[in-house]
Image: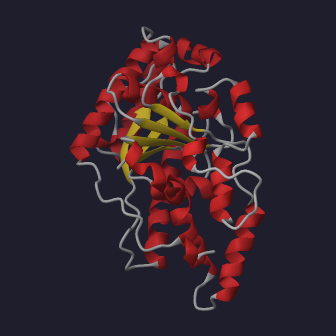
Amino acid sequence: MALIISTVNMKGGVGKTTLTVNLAACLARHHKKRVLVVDLDSQISATLSLMPPQDFARIRKARRTISYLIETTIKPTLKLKQSYDINDIICPFIANVQGLDLLPGDIELYDEYLVSEMLHKKASKDSSTDFQSIWNSFELILIKKILEPVMDNYDFIIMDCAPGYNLVTRSGLAASDFYILPARPEPLSVVGIQLLQRRIRALKESHENTDPDNLDPIKLNLLGIVFILSGGSLLNRYYNQVMRRVSDDFTSTQLFKNKIPMDVNVAKALDTFQPVVISMPATAGAKAFQKLSGEFLEKLKDAGGITDRSPGRINLADIE
């Protein structure tokens, strides 16, 4: 079964997508792992980092994005012209890398009205269950239910979560075994770290309170914080001060030793619609990601991994 890893920070612009696609590409190319990138951000940055816009426009027109899977999970009785399953929507051999696949994102991930309507109907039918409990149950299974059919096909499923804290991000975190927290050593990015930690604690507690006997609780654990740096000696001295402050709040095992330098080639790689580790593997940024992927595997080995990822007692039929 795949290990599910989320990359997430409450603040945008911290290098989250860059980390996601380059880590995934390194794991596939250099470590021969089977990796699925899942784009859960409506900005679709991960998708456009791995395929040209014209290819995305074509698959979106055919409705072959994750939004289709979310919609049919929310309302499985919905009548649609074309029926797909997740295997029809996943783009294999992405960026010409064997073992690297993509579940494309969408600029409109889900219809809030459909979600609200479905959950309110459930609440009105079941007077013994409050709306918050129904919401928590749905949140817990939405992304997990989508990924379940392909869990045995991959070593890793790496999800690029949106900044902020919407339904899809929370559901992605609830489905994950670990999360990686990319951050720039800047005050606002550090605030994003603190907000995320607080919200993850609340997420776990809300589901425990909904069903204290739940046999499949949220297993989410921090794998580590990855710092994305910028150049310049003055900036580096300032960054070191901020990173020391972060080190006071986390153990050394919760911080990745390898940091990613701000290499202009990382940005240039976007013009090729490929990660820098594929388009320019000899650059400083690419080499840093290659080292990081090795540390990533070591951290998972030290953490012992997770082998029990059964779907638990929550059934989709219970919330339809």
Name the side, left or right, on which 201 lies relative to 142: left
- Identify which residue, 248 or 207, lies in the foreground: 207
Name the side, left or right, on which 244 lies relative to 185: left
Name the side, left or right, on which 52 lies relative to 248: right
Q: In which quarter of the image is the C terminus?
A: bottom right
Q: Point out residue 60 in the picture as x, y percentages from the top left corner.
A: 73, 39
**Quarter of the rendering containing residue 95:** top right
- Identify which residue, 297 or 198, lies in the foreground: 297
**Quarter of the rendering containing residue 257:** top left
Q: Is residue 197 visible to the viewer in this orientation of the structure? A: no
- Identify which residue, 173 or 72, lies in the foreground: 72
Give the residue at x 55% y 33%.
17
Name the side, left or right, on which 121 lies relative to 50: right
Q: Point out residue 317 in the picture as x, y percentages from the top left corner.
A: 57, 75
Give the residue at x 52% y 60%.
145
Give above or below for 278 relative to 60: above
